[in-house]
Image (cartoon, rainbow, N blue to C red):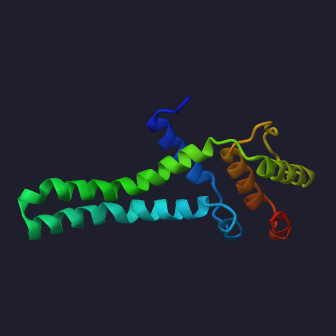
């Protein structure tokens, strides 16, 4: 069953907030690049959209207003597309290889005495994000180097 768009956007925002932006993860997961691009887009795209519409109206005139607005809306939609991708990704079940890696990290963190939620039988990317965030915040750098 597909989630309604507001729920997907909310999940995307939560996933973006919970994903650890660590250099060790940039080569392993596209999330790091998508999150960086989405955050950049939220900062830059509104100004770019307004400038695009204003410049087109100035040089091409009011008769090109529909095209100018279409291009402005496109620029505004880019960071939203990032949130949608993140929201959908956060709810996907981990593939088998990644699931075993998730369980391995969970076990190692439990042995180190970390307080964790229960181990999920069908973990999603959101649970992986929370586990990795906990690993990077509570464990020392020597231990997290061995995870990757």
Residue 28, by quadrant, is bottom right
Q: Is residue 88 left or right of residue 113?
A: left
The quadrant of the rendering that contains the N terminus is top right
Residue at 77% across, 57% down: 135
Above or below, 126 against 147 in this view is above
Q: Is residue 10 left or right of residue 132?
A: left
Question: Is residue 13 visible in this depiction of the protein?
Answer: no
Task: Name the residue nearer the viewer: 29 or 35.
Answer: 29
52 left or right, relative to 63 = right
Residue depicted at x 56% and y 53%? 16
Coordinates of residue 124 in the picture (x, y in percent):
69, 42
Coordinates of residue 60 in the picture (x, y in percent)? 9, 67
Numbered disc total: 0
Instruction: Specify the farthest residue to the right.
Output: 111
Q: Where is residue 120, by image quadrant?
A: top right
Residue 113: percent from the left, percent from the top? 89, 51
Which of 101 and 145 lies nearest the eye of the viewer? 101
Q: In this view, which residue lies farthest toward the top?
A: 1
- Residue 108, placed above or below residue 88: below
Q: Position of residue 29 (x, y in %)?
A: 66, 61
The residue that appears at 26% across and 58% down in the rendered structure is: 72
Residue 5 left/right relative to 128: left
The residue located at (55%, 42%) in the rendering is 11
């Amino acid at each position: 069953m597909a989630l309604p768009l507001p729920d997907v956007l909310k999940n995307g925002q939560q996933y973006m907030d919970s994903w650890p932006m660590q250099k060790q993860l940039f080569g392993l997961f596209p999330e790091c690049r998508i999150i960086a691009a989405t955050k950049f887009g939220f900062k830059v795209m509104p100004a770019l959209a307004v400038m695009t519409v204003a410049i087109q109206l100035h040089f091409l005139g009011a008769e090109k207003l529909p095209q100018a607005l279409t291009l402005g809306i496109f620029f505004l939609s880019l960071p939203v597309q990032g949130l949608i991708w993140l929201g959908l990704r956060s709810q996907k079940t981990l593939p088998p290889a990644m699931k075993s890696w998730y369980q391995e990290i969970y076990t190692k963190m439990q042995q180190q005495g970390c307080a964790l939620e229960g181990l999920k039988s069908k973990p999603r990317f959101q649970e992986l994000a929370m586990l990795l965030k906990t690993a990077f915040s509570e464990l020392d750098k020597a231990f997290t180097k061995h995870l990757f």
